[in-house]
Image (tube, rainbow, N blue to C red):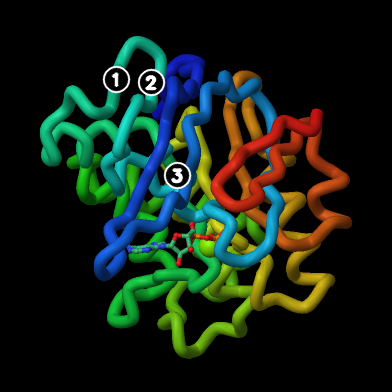
Amino acid sequence: MTGAGDLQLQTVDLSRIYPSGEGQVVALRPFTHTFPAGLTAVVGPSGSGKSTLLNLLAGFDQPSSGHVQVGDTVLTTLSEAQRADFRLANYGFVFQNHNLVSILTAQENVEFPLTLSGVPPRERRDRARALLAQVGLEQRAGHLPHQLSGGEAQRVSLARALVRDPAIVLADEPTGNLDSHSGQRVLELLTAPARPGRTVVLITHDRDIAALAEHRLEVHDGEVTVLS
Ligand code: ADP
Ligand code: MG
């Protein structure tokens, strides 16, 4: 299976204000940006708006103003079901908590995005096997998530994110719970197999990891600054 062509990820005047009791929280101030292909690290203190930004980029959340554009598609113009299909076709996700399905084996978890999109069983299995091999876990294919270490589960999660060869990968502190060795490995895998044109947006509180990224954004109090 081949991935979608290059898709440029853009924000235009994108903002998010959450209602909060009587008042409101300005979680993201109007932000216009074109994400370059390659790795962009997003840094900033806790509560600054990093996850808010990522959730908007994914179309999980709706902006208070502005929009996210992916290639020719404006996410806000899609219905919820269309957004789900669009995500499945074009995005991969890695979360801090690996979010694996607890009753599925590592192999079945990696196959899952392919199952959802109707890929036949044999192709699913081969593709998932190949990805598990890439993350060094072919020996763990039959294990359930609770039988894996934190680092292993995170690598399975990464294999699942990449199994459809997505144009865009969004990662919210994927190395947060890992020791530095596992974290380094996840980071390498996230960046190394990037095919030309893939856009990876990585939230991290780790300055060393951020320093490895080609591009950096810093978020403070909902204000995003382009560092490089
Ligand atoms: P970060 O990921 O940088 O830690 P978040 O994007 O999660 O920050 O949060 C940014 C701000 O928005 C914080 O002040 C947080 O409390 C607030 N916030 C996040 N999600 C919600 C929500 N669903 N409802 C109300 N406030 C929220
Ligand atoms: Mg967060």
| Residue 217 in picture, x, y percent from top left | 70, 38
Q: CA distance from mark 3 to mark 2?
A: 17 Å
Disc 3 residue crowd, few under 14, some 14–19, many 20+, Cα 10 Å: many
Q: CA distance from mark 1 to mark 3?
A: 18 Å
Q: Is residue 164 above or below residue 125?
A: above
Q: Are marks 3 and 2 in contact (CB under 8 Å)?
A: no
Q: Amino acid at mark 3?
A: Gly
Please tell me whether mark 2 sits on a helix, a strand or a loop.
strand
Disc with the residue nearer the chain's start (3 vs 2):
2
Q: Amino acid at mark 1?
A: Val
Q: Is residue 35 above or below residue 165?
A: above
Quarter of the image with the N terminus in it: top left
Q: Which residue is mark 3?
A: 92
Q: Nearer the viewer, residue 182 or 28?
A: 28
Q: Residue furthest top?
A: 72
| Residue 57 in picture, x, y percent from top left | 42, 38
Disc with the residue nearer the chain's start (1 vs 3):
1
Q: CA distance from mark 1 to mark 2?
A: 4 Å
Q: Are marks 1 and 3 in contact (CB under 8 Å)?
A: no
Quarter of the image with the C terminus in it: top right
Label annotation for residue 74: 1
Q: Is mark 3 within 8 Å of ligand 2?
A: no
Q: Which residue is mark 2?
A: 69
Disc with the residue nearer the chain's start (1 vs 2):
2
Horizontally, residue 94 falls left or right of residue 1, namely right
| Residue 141 in picture, x, y percent from top left | 48, 70
Q: Residue at x 34, y 57 (%)?
A: 24
Q: Are marks 1 and 2 in contact (CB under 8 Å)?
A: yes
Horizontally, residue 164 falls left or right of residue 215, namely left
Q: Residue at x 40, y 57 (%)?
A: 25
Q: Nearer the viewer, residue 15 or 68?
A: 15
Horizontally, residue 212 falls left or right of residue 81, namely right
